[in-house]
Structure formats: C-alpha cells, structure tokens
Amino acid sequence: MSAVDEPASWPDTPFAFEEFVDREERRQMRLAGELHESNDSEEERLSDEDMLMLTALHERGEPPVVTLARKWYCLGPSRPIFSFQ
C-alpha cells in the first residue's frame, strides 16, 4: 500500500500528553454513552452516528469523514450544549 492509499490518521500524541489525552478520551466516551442511552428527547440524545464518529476518533484514531453525525461539545458542569453543523 502506498502512502496515497493509506487511510488518514491523527499524528501520534507526544508522550508528555498521552495520559491526559487517554483520560479525556475515556471521559468523552463515558459522557457520550450516557447521552446515547438517555431518556431525553431525540434532539438531545446522541445518535448512533454520533457514537460511530466518536469511536472512529478515539478507538481507531481516524479523523472524521463526511458523516451524518453532529458535532457537539460541552461547556462547564451543566448539561451539554450541542452544536449542530
């Protein structure tokens, strides 16, 4: 497989930041799992596509591709704030 044929991936995390990155990935996946399984309205619940995107980002280390997933983020200790894009 040539470099052109290889799938895209994120650059390696510098050693000094690995523990932080791993901890944040676990935190994001835990929060995402709770939101995916929540009894909230469908608008607030994470979709299967959202979970697939996070899995690609964190478990396989792949950058996102064109997807139906929505981008989301959380600010502060309150309920997550979703950014639909």
Image: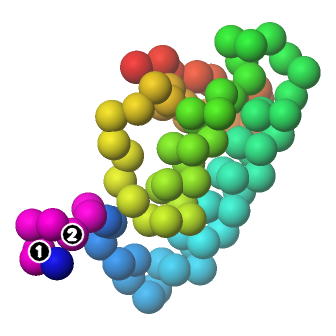
Q: Nearer the viewer, residue 67 or 84?
A: 67
* Residue 51 at x, y percent in the picture: 63, 41
Is 6 magenta? The answer is yes
Tell me the quarter of the picture where residue 42 sits.
top right
Residue 54 versus residue 39 in the image, above or below: below
* Camera-side residue of 45 and 15: 45
| Mark 2 residue element | loop
Label annotation for residue 6: 2
* Residue for point 71% across, 18% down: 44
Colour mapping: rainbow
**Residue toward you, 59 or 21:** 59
Please name the residue shown 35% across and 78% down the image.
12
Label 1 crowd bin: few (<14), some (14–19), many (20+), radius 10 Å: few
Q: Which residue is mark 1?
A: 3
Q: Position of residue 61 (x, y in %)?
A: 44, 65
Q: Position of residue 33 (x, y in %)?
A: 77, 44
Quadrant where the C terminus is found in the figure: top left
Q: Looking at the image, which residue is at 61% across and 61% down?
A: 25
Marks counted in the figure total: 2
- The Cα atoms of the two marked residues, 1 and 2, are separated by 5 Å
Up/down of 30 relative to 51, above or below: below
User: Which kind of residue does numbered mark 2 sit on?
Assistant: Glu
Disc 1 vs disc 2: Cβ atoms closer than 8 Å?
A: yes
Above or below: residue 7 compared with residue 71: below
| 51 with respect to 1 (left or right) | right
Segment colored magenta:
2-8
Mark 2 Cα-neighbour bin, 10 Å: few <14, some 14–19, many ≥20: few
> Overall secondary structure of the magenta stretch?
loop
Q: Is residue 81 magenta?
A: no
* Residue 61 falls left or right of residue 46: left
Which amino acid, mark 1?
A: Ala
